[in-house]
Image (cartoon, rainbow, N blue to C red):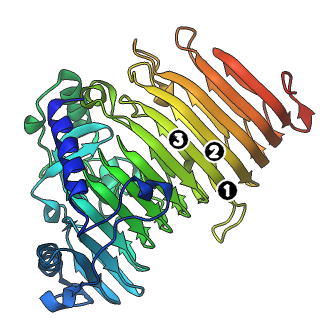
């Protein structure tokens, strides 16, 4: 772990221990028993000049309410019913941003509104870039709650064209993110000091929607997120996080639903995902830069979530160079028809890496899966993510367990593990799995210590099952 990151995490531990008057949460929050608690003090944004007409810029009013709440010792910044136009919202310790039922927060689509740049992580590499729509740095006891809607207003005319894909509004001659991403990857590989990694104005890396960075005791509950520019919920280098009863709706590029990134003690429960990319993706940094920071994601608990569309219900990686361990996902539902037509989630569990990532994945357990709809490969491990086969730093993957899966819709491979002989996947347990319509047989390459019990594919017991 780098010294600045270590100092900041130690500081957060001290702050959280002293924060009882503001937020009495602890690691118990990660077990789903709570989250930060706030004084019964309310700070309506209308008291600071906000107008809910969907046109008036409320950025300054929301900022003033956040600062007033923080100075008073904590409480709830209230966004009442109405349409509220704003730029980025930066939370401070002790502040719950409460978006009431009937409220819709409309975030600006002007990139200049998200300046000055802030410290962030973009696809696993640290950088100073545009602020996320909701951001906090080094805070404790913070929340985003309520039954209202947060709308980033991204579409084929705003943010999404930066992907550089005609599917999302890009046309030849328009700028796109690929040159900036190549530069950032090079900075990470070369160990360029973080203070020199500045993008933002004149560059095209889209910001995440909600990002607590180096924070402790975080709650995101009840709200609906729509039309993110990039990843939706992206806590980084943070701990004691609860994401509960949230709905994520975004069919844009890289619209991952919830990505804990080098985080500890995380609970994700009763969340509904309708995304284009992975629903949940657990990460810990990319390649050399991820190893430089050296902070794993661990103690992640996922339960009772619904997956309407997306890449994987639960993904590990591909940016996982800091390591991932102790992940438990229970009671996953991939429904056939939920008002959006047939669900299309490509995988239930995928562990994805490349031979340059390094790091490790240990002790991942996914149980009680109900998947009547189509999936591509329900259980997959690959070291060839995005076609990358070069490199001499494969990840260590051990201790993967799947139990009580009912995959009734069609799939290609029911289980596909493609490891390398020099880095086999070890200690894999497949227990009581049913795949009704698989086009191919189970494929296992370089797997050691396999346990297979009561696994059936197309009604046939699999060899090795007992």
- Looking at the image, tell me whether mark 1 or mark 3 is earlier in sequence order: 3
Q: Position of residue 90 (x, y in %)?
A: 19, 65
Residue found 16% across the figure and 31% down from its top = 3
- Looking at the image, tell me whether mark 3 or mark 2 is earlier in sequence order: 3
Tell me the distance, in whole angstroms, between the alpha carbons under discs 2 and 1.
8 Å
Q: Which quarter of the figure is the N terminus placed in?
A: top left
Element assignment for label 3: strand
Seen from the viewer's position, the closer of residues 265 and 361 is: 265
Q: Position of residue 186 (x, y in %)?
A: 21, 27
Residue marked by disc 1: 334
Residue 286 placement: quadrant: top left
Element assignment for label 2: strand
Mark number displayed over residue 327: 3
Q: Position of residue 360 (x, y in %)?
A: 45, 25
Mark number displayed over residue 348: 2
Q: Let me know if residue 133 appears in the view.
A: no
Point out the residue furthest to the right here. Answer: 460
């Amino acid at each position: 772990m780098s010294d600045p990151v270590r100092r900041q995490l130690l500081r957060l531990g001290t702050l959280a221990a002293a924060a009882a008057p503001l937020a009495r949460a602890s690691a118990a929050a990660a077990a789903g028993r709570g989250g930060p608690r706030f004084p019964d003090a309310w700070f309506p944004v209308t008291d600071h000049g906000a107008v809910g007409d969907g046109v008036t810029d409320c950025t300054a009013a929301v900022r003033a309410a956040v600062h007033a709440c923080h100075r008073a010792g904590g409480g709830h910044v209230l966004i009442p019913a109405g349409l509220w136009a704003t730029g980025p919202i930066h939370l401070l310790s002790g502040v719950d941003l409460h978006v009431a039922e009937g409220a819709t927060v409309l975030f600006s689509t002007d990139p200049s509104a998200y300046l000055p740049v802030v410290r962030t992580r973009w696809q696993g590499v640290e950088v100073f870039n545009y602020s996320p729509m909701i951001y906090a740095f080094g805070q404790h006891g913070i929340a985003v709650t309520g039954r209202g809607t947060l709308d980033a207003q991204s579409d084929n005319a705003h943010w999404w064209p930066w992907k550089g894909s005609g599917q999302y509004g890009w046309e030849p001659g328009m700028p796109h993110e690929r040159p900036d991403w190549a530069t950032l990857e090079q900075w990470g590989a070369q160990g360029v000091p973080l203070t020199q990694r500045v993008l933002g104005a004149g560059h095209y890396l889209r910001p995440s929607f909600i990002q607590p960075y180096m924070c402790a005791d975080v709650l995101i509950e009840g709200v609906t997120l729509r039309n993110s520019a990039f990843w939706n919920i992206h806590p980084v280098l943070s701990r004691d996080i609860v994401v509960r009863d949230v709905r994520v709706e975004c069919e844009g590029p890289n619209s991952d639903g919830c990505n804990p990134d080098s985080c500890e003690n995380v609970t994700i429960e009763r969340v509904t995902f309708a995304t284009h990319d992975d629903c949940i993706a657990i990460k810990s940094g990319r390649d050399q830069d991820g190893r430089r920071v050296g902070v794993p994601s661990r103690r992640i608990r996922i339960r009772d979530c619904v997956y309407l569309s997306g890449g994987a219900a639960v993904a590990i990686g591909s940016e996982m160079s800091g390591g991932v361990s102790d992940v438990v996902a229970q009671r996953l539902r991939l429904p056939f028809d939920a008002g959006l037509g047939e669900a299309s989630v490509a995988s239930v569990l995928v562990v994805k890496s490349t031979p340059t990532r390094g790091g490790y994945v240990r002790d991942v357990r996914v149980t009680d899966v109900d998947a009547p709809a189509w999936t591509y490969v329900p259980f997959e491990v690959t070291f060839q993510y995005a076609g990358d086969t070069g490199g001499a730093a494969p990840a260590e993957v051990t201790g993967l367990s799947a139990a009580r899966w009912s995959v009734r819709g069609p799939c290609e491979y029911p289980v596909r593990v493609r490891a390398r002989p020099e880095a086999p996947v070890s200690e894999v347990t497949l227990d009581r799995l049913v795949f009704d319509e698989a086009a191919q047989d189970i494929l296992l390459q370089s797997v050691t210590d396999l346990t297979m019990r009561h696994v059936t594919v197309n009604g046939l017991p699999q060899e090795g099952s007992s």
